[in-house]
Image (cartoon, rainbow, N blue to C red):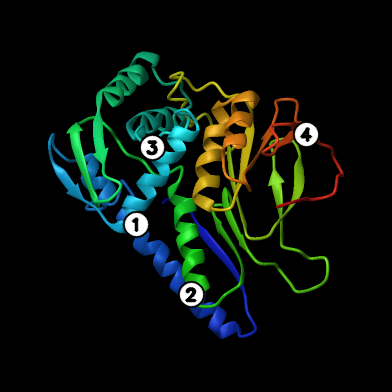
């Protein structure tokens, strides 16, 4: 998943907490072998290399992740899309060389992707490649999916309080940092390009996307462009996979589009964006955007 995972586990017995964390890290490593398109022999690698008409048997975990990705694709009107891995490679390669990708090259890859078809059965762990050309990439949901799996394993260990992070852009909070009155969760910072804002998470996930670290690496598959409505975006959700994916989608969606998606999601979802002028704005299920003023009390989720 090409990122660093960090876990803070709170438990009365430190040795037990370390053992639980090690088990969670092992689960992350196991999922990497199933979900990474760069890991030869993984489920995603085999789908991307399958021939026309081939049926690829996949793991239960990969099946669950693909179903979530499909649902989020539909919820966002196609703004979130895991089938554009080849286009993402072109964009990232150009970014590393500090050049803009050739428009025709990007359009050719997106045309090939548009003509590709894979079939996923909700009830069977099989993917059928009916038309090749898709390049599945779970990078925008895989980190969050892995954090959700790690949290589930920690709960099996009866760990109630932990803060799980994947590269700082995907965060999942379980319980609270301490039992002190008024703590209420785990304090984190929304780090924007020009300012930050305090946030307290309790049994919630936060996903972040932007251009500050990786440049213009996000593609809008609907408009076939790299035009962004914001300079940074965050998604709050009960699960890290959804927060991870939605924050990516928010980057290419305008505020009206985001508000419509948030209003249609289950309770507990919200969006935050940073505008080019540095202002931060929050939208919950009411569909109303509120500006977060500097020095305001922490947002609690």
Residue 247: tell me if it is visible.
Answer: yes
Q: Earlier in the sequence, mark 1 or mark 3?
A: 1
Disc 4: which residue = 290
Q: Secondary structure at mark 4?
A: strand
Residue at horizontal 48%, vertical 66%?
152
Q: Secondary structure at mark 1?
A: helix
Disc 4 + disc 3, Cβ < 8 Å: no
Tag in front: 1 or 3: 1
Residue 136, numbered circle: none
Disc 2: which residue = 156
Residue at horizontal 44%, vertical 22%?
222
Residue at horizontal 59%, vertical 51%?
168
**Residue 99 pos. (x, y %):** 46, 23
Disc 1 + disc 4, Cβ < 8 Å: no
**208 or 105: nearer the viewer:** 208
**156 or 40: nearer the viewer:** 156
Q: Earlier in the sequence, mark 2 or mark 3?
A: 3
Residue 61, numbered circle: 1
């Amino acid at each position: 998943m090409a990122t660093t995972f960090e876990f803070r586990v709170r438990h009365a017995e430190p040795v037990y907490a370390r053992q639980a964390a090690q088990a969670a890290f092992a689960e992350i490593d196991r999922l990497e072998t199933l979900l990474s398109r760069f890991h030869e022999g993984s489920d995603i690698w085999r789908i991307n290399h399958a021939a026309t008409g081939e049926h690829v048997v996949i793991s239960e975990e990969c099946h669950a992740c693909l179903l979530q990705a499909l649902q989020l694709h539909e919820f966002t009107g196609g703004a979130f899309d895991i089938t554009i891995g080849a286009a993402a490679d072109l964009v990232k390669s150009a970014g590393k060389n500090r050049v803009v990708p050739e428009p025709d090259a990007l359009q050719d890859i997106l045309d090939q992707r548009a003509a590709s078809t894979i079939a996923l059965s909700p009830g069977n762990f099989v993917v059928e490649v009916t038309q090749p050309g898709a390049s599945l990439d779970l990078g925008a949901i895989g980190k969050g999916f892995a954090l959700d799996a790690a949290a589930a394993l920690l709960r099996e260990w009866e760990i109630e309080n932990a803060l799980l992070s994947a590269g700082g852009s995907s965060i999942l909070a379980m319980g609270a940092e301490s039992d002190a009155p008024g703590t209420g969760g785990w304090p984190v910072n929304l780090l924007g390009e020009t300012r930050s804002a305090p946030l307290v998470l309790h049994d919630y996930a936060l996903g972040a996307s932007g251009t500050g670290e990786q440049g213009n690496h996000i593609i809008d598959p609907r408009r076939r462009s790299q035009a962004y409505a914001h300079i940074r975006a965050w998604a709050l959700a009960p699960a890290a996979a959804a927060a991870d994916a939605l924050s990516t989608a928010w980057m290419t969606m305008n505020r009206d589009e985001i508000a419509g998606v948030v209003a249609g999601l289950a309770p507990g979802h919200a969006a935050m964006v940073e505008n080019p002028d540095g202002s931060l704005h929050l939208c919950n299920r009411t569909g109303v955007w509120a500006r977060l003023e500097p020095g305001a009390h922490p947002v609690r989720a």
